Image (cartoon, rainbow, N blue to C red):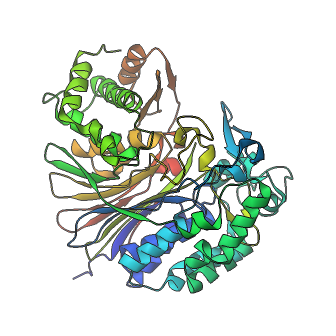
Amino acid sequence: MPNPPRGAVAAGHRLTADAATEVLAAGGNAFDALISALWTACVVEPVLCSPGGGGFLMARPEGRQAAVLDFFVQTPRRRRPVDELDFHEVIADFGTDQQAFHIGLGSIATPGFVRGLFEMQRRLGSMPMRELVAPAVQHAREGVALDALQAYIFSIVAPIYLATDEARAVFESPSRPGHTLQAGEILRQPELAETLEILAIEGDDLFYRGEIAALIEQQCLEGGGQIGREDLARYETAERGALRAGMGDHALWTNPPPSSGGILIAFALRLLDSLPDGWLPASGPRRAVRIARLLDITNKARIEHHVDVPTADVQEEYALLDPQLIARYREELLGAPQAMRGTTHVSVVDGQGNLAAATVSNGEGCGHLVPGTGIMLNNMLGEEDLNPHGFHRWQPDRRMTSMMAPGILRLASGAEVVLGSGGSNRIRSALLQVILHLADGADLQAAVDAPRLHVEGQQLSIEGGFDADSIEALQAAWPEHVLWQERNLFFGGVHAVMREPGGGLVAVGDPRRAGEARVV
C-alpha cells in the first residue's frame, strides 16, 4: 500500500512552498514547516514578509482546540513630537491608478515577527530553529532570481525600496538604474543571511534585547523614529481562543478581536445564517448581486461600529455579533434595493492531524534597513487603514488592528480547510467568497479560482471571469463600479489546504498571487 501523505502546503512563492515541503519530508510537523516557510518568505517575498513586520498564526494541534497566536505589531510606548519625525509620503504607481503611502523611521511600529516565530517553535515545533531557517539563509546568501510577480510588486513600491542608500544597494536593478530589480535579476541579501543565521543560534532576545535592539533604538533616536529598547524588550505575543462562526452545518474558526478581519467574516456568516433558506442561490446573476450586497452590508457595519478602531475593552468589539444587531442588519439586507498593503499567507497540514495557517505583513516597508542586518522594518504607523483617526493619533502601547484572518473551516462533510489571504482590505472579501463557494459544494480549486467582488465605500470592484448576465446584473445594481478584465492580485491571494473526510490531502495556491501548492 502507498504511504499516507506527510502533509500539504499552499503558499505565495515556489521557494516558500519548497521550504515547508522539505521540512515535512524530513519528518517535521506542520508548525515546523510553517516556520521554515515564513523565514523563506522574508527572503523571496521581501515586500510582503519581513522580520521587521508581524502577523497571526491560526493553530490547531492534533487533539487540541484551535487558537490564535497574535504576533502583530504594537504601537510605541511614547509618541515623539511630529516635527521631529522622519515621516513622509511617497506615491506608488499601479499603472492605471496611484496610491499614497507614508514611510520613514517615524512610521515603524514595534515588530512581532521574530518573537512570533520563536514562540511557535518553542510551543509547537519539533525541529531546531537552525534547521528551519537554513533554506532562507541559503537563498539570501546565494541569491534568487526574481519572479514576475515579485518584480511587479517591487515596481509598484519602488519609491520605498529606493528611498535610502542602504535599500538601493540591495533592491536597485543593475541593468536599469533608478528602478527596482527586474524579473529574472538576482536578489542577494548577504547581510540578512548572516542575521538569520545568528538569530537561529542566539534566539529572539538578540532582536528584542540584544545587539539588533540597540541598532533599532539608535537608528530611531538619531533619525526620527519612535521605537526604543523598552518597546522591544516588553513586546510579547498574545494567545487567544479562536473566534467560532457557524453557518448551517459548517463552522469557521478565525482571528478574534482586537483584529478586525475575523470578526467581519464572522458577522457576514452569522448574518447569512439568519436569512431564509435559498436567499443565496448556488449560481447565476442573483448570486453575484447578493454576494455584493452581503459585502456591502458588512462594510457598512464595519464603518458604523468602528470595527477598525482598537479599544481597551476587547469585549466591546464582539458587540458586532450581538443577535439583535444581526437581526437589524438582516432586515436592512432583506429590504435593501437590488441596487495594496503587502501581505502573504501560508497554509500547512501534516499527517499527524496538525493544522496551521499564518498571514503576515510588513506594510509596504519603511524604506530603511536596520544597519548591518538586511532587515526592512514595517511602516504600520503610516498605514491609513490602521490609523482610522489620522496619523500620529494612535494610543501608545496598544496592539494594532488588522484585516488578516487566517482560519480553519470545517465543512458539513467533515472536510477541514486551512486558509487565509493577503490583500489588505480585500482579505475579508476574498476569504468570505471562497468560504461561501465551499459551503455550496465547490471543490477547493474551483472555490479559489472563482471570480471575486469587493465593495469599498460606494464602489463595487468586479473581477474578470463572471458570465455576461452576472456582469450586467452587477452593473445595474451598482452604478459606481470598476470592471476588471481579468483575474488580479487586487482581489487577494487565498492559499488553502484541505484534509478530506477519508484522510486525503488537497492543496491550492491562488494564481492571482503566483500561489504554489504541494502534497508531500
Residue displayed at 51% across by 65% down: 235
Q: Is residue 514 visible?
A: no
Residue displayed at 79% across by 51% down: 163
Image coords of residue 265 (percent x, y): 32, 42
Q: Does 31 sit left or right of 141 as displayed?
A: left
Quarter location, residue 23: bottom left
Q: Does 88 sit left or right of 350 as displayed?
A: right
Residue displayed at 47% across by 44% down: 492
Image coords of residue 299 (percent x, y): 39, 30
Which quadrant, please, contains the N terminus?
Answer: bottom left
Relative depth, front residue between 176 and 84: 84
Residue displayed at 34% across by 48% down: 314
Q: Does 461 sit left or right of 2 as displayed?
A: right
Relative depth, front residue between 155 and 237: 237
Image coords of residue 68 (percent x, y): 35, 61
Quarter location, residue 430: top left
Q: Is residue 248 visible?
A: yes
Which quadrant, please, contains the C terminus?
Answer: bottom left
Q: Does 459 sit left or right of 390 as displayed?
A: left
Image coords of residue 119 (percent x, y): 44, 73
Q: Is residue 448 above or below residue 349?
A: above
Q: Count up the numbered dots.
A: 0
Q: Is residue 83 above or below residue 105?
A: above
